[in-house]
Amino acid sequence: MMLPDYFLADVPGGPVLTPQLVTDACITLKQNRTRHLVDRTTAELIELLARVAGDWLEPDNPFRRRALEEGPGVMGFSRETLNAGLDDFFGSVTEESLRALVTQDVGHPHRLERPLATEQDTHEGRRALAVGPELLVHVTGGVLPNPPMTSLMLGLLARSAQFMKCARGTSLVPRLFAHSLREVAPKLAATIEIAEWRGGDEPLEAALLAQANCVTATGRDTTLASLRQRLPVPARWVSYGHRVSVGYVTHEMLSSRMLPEIVQAAARDVAAWDQLGCLSPQAFYVESGGRFPPEHFAEALAGAMEKTERVQPAGPPAPETAAAIAARRRIYELRAANLSHTRLWQSPGSTAWTVVHEEDPDFKPSCGHRFVPVKPVANLTEALKGLDPVRGQVSTVGLGAPGPRETELVTGFARWGVTRICPLGRMQIPPLSWRHDGRPSLGDLLLWCDWESSARW
């Protein structure tokens, strides 16, 4: 399938970008928003997005096929991992999930179209309209395609013109998604621009930020801080910085009946996007006192990782990453030779996966690429003490626990600062209405206009 050079990132080798070109593109996007997007109904936009998502679930969809053909070489994931990730993402985008998102964040879908009142508003003689920014700028980070595609959908629901700046080599799938929108709604696609350039090009970024009414940004905390300092005062800022995620398994799950299911779910979470997302588990905290010890969980997880590798192989890491994985393995090999409570399981002849059992509860960042420690703990209190170095940075906890204990554990994690808790096996598949970092993803983009009527209705 040949794609037209519609977006700036489509041009082979990349166009010669200048600040003036970026400025002109932003002005055109705003004009196209007024002509083609502002007056669209929420129902129209939801139907369009759900239709495009459904198309991506079809194996013969040309955009999906191209993503699977080119993605492994560009992004570093195996075809099987990319295929599973696309299924999970687009399977969550339905008319029902989109309506739930809008209703959750604004109270009623039509509040993005005209002033409406809730029951409380009616009592106070007030209506309200939610309004999206004129130009929404997205600065993306990382190779995972789900966050930028979600950002584009949120921007359309907000009726915003959008300029997405991607890091070098990361625009393939978001660009294909934008082209799939263009195929069914060319006028709406005219409100979107996608470009690639290396971060730190201050003249280009200054031109882009000067046109923005709202900026969303993901990436390293230092990068985000630099961008925010250069953002014009009137523009709003929505950022998602460094986050980590972990799994927590209670002792009740370490039984002959439950263990096979729980380790398979844990393996799915580790394998998804090769453990490179902020929702990927970087460690599993496993309670002692069950039918089997946490070490047995680690051994079973290694077996599940080996089976997963056969059907969803890991992508080859960069040479420097492979060297880092090998070096960390050697450290644990030495510890295992001298400490009875440390054990190591690893993929033979490759760096595809690694499982470590160690009794030190202190959290240490994983090197990703399916390298995960299992840490035995007595209870939640001990786990949270081990996680204290990353308090405020834990995005998701994948929970394996029986029903009677779930409320207690969720409450404990929430009060400590975790913003999302889900069953193991679904850590990389958040619902569309997920409150990213505890904030409303669509609502964060909007401003409200309250209309205090002269008469009650």
Image (cartoon, rainbow, N blue to C red):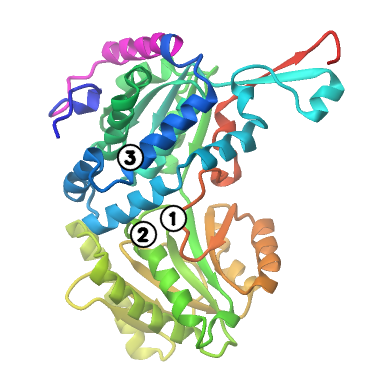
- The stretch in magenta equals 13-34
Is residue 228 visible from the viewing direction of this image?
A: no
Q: CA distance from mark 1 to mark 3?
A: 21 Å
Q: Amino acid at mark 3?
A: Asp
Residue 332 in picture, x, y percent from top left: 33, 79
Q: Which one is earlier in the sequence, the residue at label 1 or at label 3?
A: 3
Q: Is residue 46 left or right of residue 64?
A: right
Asked if the residue under mark 3 is in contact with the one under mark 2, i.e. CB atoms within 8 Å, the reply is: no
Q: Nearer the viewer, mark 1 or mark 3?
A: 3
Q: Position of residue 283 (x, y in %)?
A: 45, 68
Q: Looking at the rendered structure, which numbered label has been put on residue 290?
A: none
Q: Residues within 10 Å of mark 3 (few under 14, many from 20)?
A: some
Figure check: 260 above or below 320: below
Residue 248 or residue 4, whichever sits in front: 4
Asked whether 152 or 180 is in front, the reply is 180
Residue underneath mark 3 = 55
Q: Which residue is mark 2?
A: 272
